[in-house]
């Protein structure tokens, strides 16, 4: 190798070294390299990374003097108001929840509830404005939330992984809610219950309450998310047996569309989507046929819903089987 070649080679090494140094310097100035997201192990270390990372808990909570948020309670020991960190504080809160509800809460139950249904216990001096962390845009998984709970337990308290992984009846109920939201790709089942009541409850029964124009929806999650989604978006695609739509034209030309809810020797009842029941004498019927391409359920139901409403009601319906399993 001659001198010219050596000089060129050394020059290239210097340029490459400078390039790598500049790249590292820029990465450091912008906050360092970001590790690819992956499954977080249930434990304090995983929970810490979520608390200060993708869970964005720090935007509302501090731990002692770390963090800058004031919208939510400080989860560490901080001044007279929070003389105990959350790990120890949760024991006292569990006693309060036990007295309020008549159920026996553990400290794990309290922490699970505070993340699954933050409005259940609102600390005095703060508003009920905590985000639903298992719904978009945060969308923590059940394991993510278990990890955060384990991290919070270690703030002035002892880690109890057994109670996290083998939940009580109270915690299992909330785990079911979180799992249903994840299965539905996001959404808040609690809000979905309200959407269901406003848009679906007049026609469908659930847990013994509601109308009977459409089929009861207990256990509908057995059929899966795709079935639930298509049933809302395209209700005529798959009509449950016994809830077929009929079209009736009487001899005066009046037309009625709905479910045939009674059929005896002399007359039939047609129940419309509005709930109105029309009784027609068989001797007055000119035409009676099943409409195989129409459903009593409105095709434009989603126009009355926002995208969030749609996600929420799917999560609520996906929870039905899970609630039963957790009981």
Image (cartoon, rainbow, N blue to C red):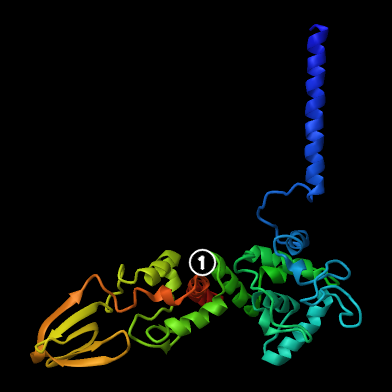
The picture quadrant where one finds residue 84 is bottom right
Q: Please report the residue visible at 51 percent of the width from the left and 81 percent of the height from the top.
A: 193
Is residue 153 visible in the rendered structure shown here? yes
Query: In this orientation, which residue lies closer to the viewer: 64 or 157?
Result: 64
Q: Please report the residue visible at 72 percent of the width from the left and 49 percent of the height from the top.
A: 35
Residue 254 versus residue 27 in the image, above or below? below
Q: Position of residue 114 (x, y in %)?
A: 70, 77
Q: Position of residue 209 (x, y in %)?
A: 43, 89
Is residue 214 shown left or right of residue 124? Answer: left
Quarter the N terminus occupies: top right
Query: In this orientation, which residue lies closer to the viewer: 214 or 176?
Result: 214
Q: Position of residue 297 (x, y in %)?
A: 33, 78
Q: Position of residue 162 (x, y in %)?
A: 72, 68
Q: Which residue is mark 1?
A: 184
Q: Please report the residue visible at 76 percent of the width from the left and 88 percent of the height from the top.
A: 96
Is residue 327 visible in the rendered structure shown here? no
Residue 128 versus residue 154 in the image, above or below? below
Residue 307 versus residue 38 in the image, above or below? below
The picture quadrant where one finds residue 163 is bottom right
Quarter the C terminus occupies: bottom right
Q: Please report the residue visible at 87 percent of the width from the left and 83 percent of the height from the top.
A: 81
The picture quadrant where one finds residue 188 is bottom right
SS category of the residue bearing label 1:
loop
Disc 1 crowd rating (10 Å Cα; few below 14, some 14-19, many 20+) is: many
Residue 243 versus residue 265 in the image, above or below? above
Q: Residue furthest right?
A: 79
């Amino acid at each position: 190798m001659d001198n010219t070649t050596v000089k060129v080679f050394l020059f290239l090494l210097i340029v490459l070294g400078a390039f790598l140094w500049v790249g590292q310097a820029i990465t450091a100035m912008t906050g360092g390299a970001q590790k690819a997201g992956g499954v977080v192990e249930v434990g304090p270390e995983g929970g810490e990374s979520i608390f200060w990372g993708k869970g964005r808990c720090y935007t509302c909570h501090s731990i002692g003097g770390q963090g800058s948020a004031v919208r939510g309670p400080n989860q560490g020991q901080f001044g007279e108001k929070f003389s105990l960190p959350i790990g120890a504080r949760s024991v006292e809160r569990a006693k309060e929840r036990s007295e309020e509800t008549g159920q026996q809460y553990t400290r794990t139950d309290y922490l699970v509830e505070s993340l699954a249904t933050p409005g259940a216990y609102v600390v005095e001096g703060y508003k009920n404005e905590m985000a639903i962390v298992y719904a978009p845009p945060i969308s923590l998984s059940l394991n993510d939330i278990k990890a955060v709970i384990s991290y919070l337990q270690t703030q002035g308290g002892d880690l109890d992984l057994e109670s996290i992984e083998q939940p009580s009846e109270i915690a299992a109920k909330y785990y079911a809610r979180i799992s249903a939201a994840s299965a539905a790709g996001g959404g808040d089942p609690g809000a979905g219950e309200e959407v269901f009541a406003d848009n679906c409850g007049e026609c469908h029964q659930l847990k013994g309450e509601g109308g009977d124009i459409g089929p009861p929806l207990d256990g509908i999650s057995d059929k899966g998310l795709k079935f639930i989604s298509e049933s809302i978006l395209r209700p005529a695609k798959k009509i449950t047996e016994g809830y077929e739509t009929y079209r009736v034209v009487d001899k005066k030309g009046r037309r009625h569309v709905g479910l045939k809810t009674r059929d005896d020797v002399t007359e039939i009842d047609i129940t419309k989507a509005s709930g109105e029941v029309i009784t027609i004498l068989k001797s007055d019927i000119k035409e009676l046929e099943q409409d195989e391409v129409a459903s009593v359920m409105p095709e434009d139901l989603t126009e009355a819903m926002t995208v969030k409403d749609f996600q929420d009601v799917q999560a609520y319906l996906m929870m039905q089987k899970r609630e039963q399993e957790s009981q």
